[in-house]
Image (tube, rainbow, N blue to C red):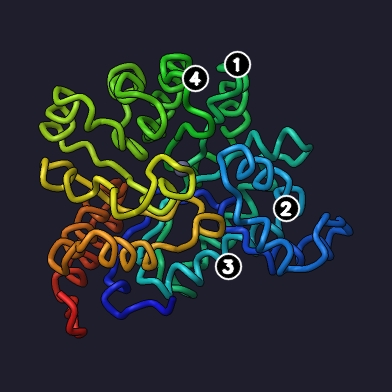
Amino acid sequence: MSLAPFARIPKAELHLHIEGTLEPELAFRLAARNGIRLPYADTEALRAAYLFDDLQSFLDLYYELMAVLVTEDDFEALADAYLERAADQGVRHAEIFFDPQAHMARGITLGTVVEGLSRALARSEERHGVSTKLIMCFLRDQSAESAMETLEAARPYLDRIVGVGLDSAEVGNPAAKFREVYEAAGALGLRKVAHAGEEGDPSYVWEALDVLGVERVDHGLRCLEDPELVARLVRDRVPLTLCPLSNVRLRAIDVLEQHPLVRMMDAGLLCTVNSDDPAYFGGYAGDTFHAVHEALGVHHERLRELARNSFEASFLDGSEADERRRARYLAEVEAFVFDDMTG
Ligand SMILES: [Zn+2]
């Protein structure tokens, strides 16, 4: 599907796992460079494996392919490839998640990951016109102790990390398990987000808000089951980083036409749409705007609202330079002209 011009409206991407941007071609290139043999004949065979049919087969492939990421250069190449694609899709600002525990568990140091990613990020504004921030995620299916050790290991790199997040298998791993590590992160001046209400019920979202003190909820899809929770999210203007294509691929929703995005916007929730793991879920940020327009009839002014929300929900508020960036991006959103005939 070629990207319609309207889908390139300037936007911020706030829910993006850098490991989920690994395209088959780059996976093969990095595997060759590191002398790693992938169990796929070629990129076509690997691309076919990307058509997984449930969460477990996605996670199996996701972790298997991470093996090709070994050196700082590999992480730099991964981030640079994402930023180039994102720029082409209208992304002007990206707040990028990474999963240090997944790499440290296979002997890659946190320093290798952060130094490599930051090299690409440091050049991104000049090279791709995309400003960036980095958010370190804890794997919620691992222990609270492991999360705390990861936070400790990150201390030398905190000048490059804006906040912490929480991802991976949600059900059975409630947010409260990570109360202490989030308190410690807050004391270090880090911003807080967490995946919640993707597959878990509304209680997971309440805990993320009240126990972890998150500023943004990643997904939050199931908040609709609890009117009191919706009222709270609306009242406090807590942003939700929705990922419609991911919800369909991971079977949270059967088909995109059934996605509650419009209902959520109508309820007054501060919604943003994002690509999550775009190499695996069938589309990048602009593709996602395109898809919700086609499947849900999200019309142009509503796309503009989503774009505006994405900058409002971003962490572009920590310095004067960031405030200036945000003001510039918001002006670009307002000035954007939808020049095609579809409404
Ligand atoms: Zn995610």
The residue wearing badge 4 is 173
Q: Say if residue 133 shows up in the picture.
A: no
**Residue 94: x and y, percent?**
41, 57
Q: Amino acid type of disc 1? A: Glu
- The quadrant in which residue 235 appears is top left
Mark 1 or mark 2, earlier in chain: 2
- The quadrant in which residue 307 appears is bottom left
Q: Amino acid type of disc 3? A: Ala
Which residue is at the front of the view, 247 or 53? 53
Disc assigned to residue 84: none
Mark 4 or mark 3, earlier in chain: 3
Q: CA distance from mark 1 to mark 3?
A: 33 Å
Which residue is at the front of the view, 277 or 319? 277
Check contact, mark 4 vs mark 3: CB within 8 A.
no
* Residue shown at the point (32%, 19%) measured from the top left: 203
**Residue 134: x and y, percent?**
47, 48
Check contact, mark 1 vs mark 2: CB within 8 A.
no
- The quadrant in which residue 270 appears is top left
Quadrant of the image containing the C terminus? bottom left
Disc 3 is placed on an element classified as: helix
Count residues near mark 2 (Cα–Cα under 10 Å), then give few for <14, some for 14-19, many for 20+.
many
Mark 1 or mark 3, earlier in chain: 3
Disc 1 is placed on an element classified as: helix
Disc 4 is placed on an element classified as: loop
The residue wearing badge 1 is 145
Q: Is residue 142 above or below residue 45?
A: above
